[in-house]
Image (cartoon, grey):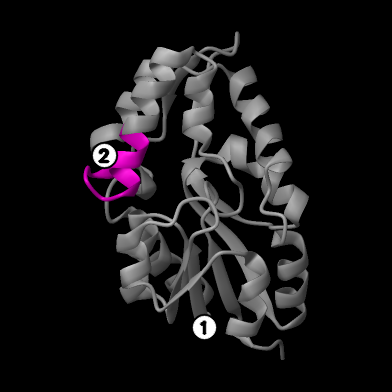
Amino acid sequence: MSPPLKLLILDCDSTLSAIEGIDELARVRGPEIFARVEAMTHEAMDGRLPVEAVFGERLRIIQPRAADVAAIGRRYIETVEPDAAGALATLRAGGWTPLILSGGFRPAIRPLADHLGIARVEAVDLYFDSAGAFVGFDETYPTTRSGGKPEVVRALKAELRPSRVVMVGDGVSDLETAPEVDCFIGFGRYVAREKVRAGAARFVHSFAELPALLE
């Protein structure tokens, strides 16, 4: 009989990687669009705007191409949290199964997940035409709106029946999962948000700190 599952749910942007993927997609479109989109991202991640108020609008402004998304996938790997791979190896040895839960985009995050040996990515699908032009996104996916991450956590718990669930993330959308998990750990290596720090059971600045917390 296999031991009960211990689920480690990880945010991606500004947590597993130093970048915000949506902002990097905007950067490709020039400084004016980058500034607009970055401001919208901060408003949402700080909890001053609901996610749904900015999610589709940022993509409408950017109109990302499939090639741009692939390039962000490479950037995620280049900017990976430097202690992540070692910490995840230690945690796996201790019986933890990592999973990525993100308000970002599955095709961009998948290369980073593969790089870190993480099998499952819960994130938003993007759609492109045969020429690689943007045609839309999965508007029904929970993380496109406020309250979406706890909704996914509830579904994961129902599906996987884990014995323990821990969430690690930097944003208010991550903090929303706190009532659904055994421990919410705020992450502040790249952006230390005071609302997240105040609401987190623990707050860390490096993945190297996680194994000792989760023993």
Q: Please determine whether, in this image, residue 190 is positioned above or below residue 21.
A: below
Find disc 2 in the rendering and name its residue. 52
Residue 199 lies left or right of residue 170; in this view the side is: left
| Front-lying residue, 210 or 56 | 210
Q: Where residue 67 sits in the image (x, y, percent)? A: 64, 18
**Residue at position x 35%, y 55% in the image:** 173
Q: Please determine whether, in this image, residue 126 is positioned above or below residue 117.
A: above
| Front-lying residue, 98 or 156 | 98
User: Which region is colored magenta?
Assistant: 40-51
The image quadrant of residue 211 is bottom right
Query: Is residue 150 in sight in this rendering?
Result: no
Query: Is residue 180 in sight in this rendering?
Result: yes
For the residue labelled by badge 2, is the local secondary structure a helix, a strand or a loop?
A: helix
Query: What amino acid is found at the position of numbered circle 2 in the picture?
Result: Glu
Find disc 1 in the rendering and name its residue. 164
Q: Where residue 153 sits in the image (x, y, percent)? A: 42, 66
